[in-house]
Image (tube, helix red, strand yellow):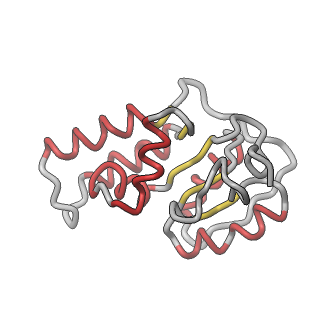
Amino acid sequence: MSASAPGARGASYRVVLDTNVCLDLFVFRDPAVARLAHALAEGRVEAVTDAACREEWRRVLGYPQLALEQAAQLAALAGYDRWIRCPADAWAMPAQVRLPRCADPDDQKFLELALAAGAGWLLSKDKEVLRLGRRTLRDGLFAIVTPAQWLPGQEGDA
């Protein structure tokens, strides 16, 4: 595959990150997403979001099971806002494109965002979402991969 993302209609390295990947990046600072963090910091990739996905991120930061203090929540939200672009206008969904349906309706918005934003990749750790990747790639839309599988700019891009 060339350096352009599979099915990309926008930036070559535009990605959508699901909430669990964002937790690894901005809360847990998991070494498994270090390559992604460096790519974001160096401007080699553009991560995008929309109002619905950002609202889910804000809400998840307050979950009791995370037990994040207010300062940690604010820092995670600030990191998200710094590295993930949220345009003022909503992304427009292309007409006549059928996406696979997620078993969890809360995950569907990430597929819709990836399509509407022209992302080449949706990075996820959710097994149900990852299973849909074969279809989105076959249909020329975008790849759905884990952060560890994501290798932009290298042979075999996705």
* Above or below for 90 versus 150: above
Q: Residue at x 77, y 62 (%)?
A: 137
State which quarter of the image contains the C terminus: bottom right
Marks counted in the figure total 0
**Whole-percent x and y of residue 136?**
76, 62
Residue at 42 percent of width and 46 percent of height: 37
Q: Nearer the viewer, residue 55 or 85?
A: 85
Left or right, 91 with reference to 123: right
Residue 140 position within the rendered picture, expressed as x and y whole percent measured from the top left:
83, 55
**In the image: residue 114, left or right of residue 58:** right
Q: Nearer the viewer, residue 97 or 6?
A: 6
Q: Position of residue 148 (x, y in %)?
A: 52, 64
| Quarter of the rendering occupied by the N terminus | bottom right
Q: Is residue 128 above or below residue 71?
A: below
Identity of the residue furthest to the front in this view? 155
The quadrant holding residue 149 is bottom right
- Residue at (35, 60) in percent of width and height: 31
Horizontally, residue 94 falls left or right of residue 36, namely right
